[in-house]
Amino acid sequence: MLPRTMQLILFGPPGIGKGTQSALLVERLGLKHVSTGDLLRGAIRGGTALGQQAKAFIDAGRLVPGALVRGIANERLAEIGYDNVILDGYPRTVEQAEWVDEDFAAAGHPITVVVSITGDNEVIVERLAARGRPDDAPDIVRKRLAVYAAETAPVEDHYRQAGLLVTVDGEGDVEEVYGRIVQAIESVLVER
């Protein structure tokens, strides 16, 4: 039985189906979705002060600094609350994970579980190449997967050590994967 409220972080490489699974978790569990990518794009479109700062970095071809991403995420979380939330694509570094832990704990809603959706890289490469977008060319996808693995491994270790990380096989039918995610969340909560 899933709790009435939870704070969930969802990890997974590009093309694994995080967006699809996030949508199902939002729809079926009533979670509020927070995607830093969506938030950054929205802040830029909206011309907010933080959005203008982020745009300057993006236009210069640089990564948006973590503190700026934290500010944008915290603006959104202040609006919707820190309970019953799914974070998608954030945190990406151990420093950001520590900020997330601090911010959610300070709000009285510590992170409940971290789900890492995994899959075979070559299956992901084939799936993305079939979409036909320019950034889905096989060599580019392999580079994106390598960057993802390098960035995310330390964050996953952080949450594994905290006893919050579960790994779920992301291959197969959408409903199968969703079922595995719910089962993994339940198993972590039962162990506590």
Image (cartoon, helix red, strand yellow):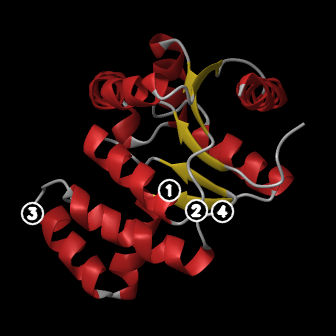
Disc 4: which residue: 83
* Residue shown at 9% from the left, 63% from the top: 60
Disc 2: which residue: 108
Tell me the CA gap for discs 2 and 1.
Answer: 5 Å
Residue type for callout 3: Ala
Mark 3 touching mark 4, by CB under 8 A? no
Of pointers 3 and 4, the one earlier in the residue sequence: 3
Disc 1: which residue: 105
How many residues crowd mark 4 within 10 Å: few (<14), some (14–19), many (20+)?
Answer: many
Residue that extends furthest to the left in the rendered view of this protein: 60
Tell me the CA gap for discs 3 and 1.
Answer: 35 Å
Return the x and y of residue 1 as percentages of the image width and height: 90, 36
Q: Nearer the viewer, mark 2 or mark 3?
A: 2
Q: Is residue 17 left or right of residue 191?
A: left
* Residue shown at 70% from the left, 59% from the top: 84
Disc 3: which residue: 60
Q: Nearer the viewer, mark 2 or mark 4?
A: 2
Tell me the CA gap for discs 2 and 4.
Answer: 9 Å
Q: Nearer the viewer, residue 77 or 53?
A: 77
Tell me the CA gap for discs 1 and 4.
Answer: 11 Å
Of pointers 2 and 3, the one earlier in the residue sequence: 3
Residue type for callout 2: Gly
Mark 2 touching mark 1, by CB under 8 A? yes
Of pointers 1 and 4, the one earlier in the residue sequence: 4
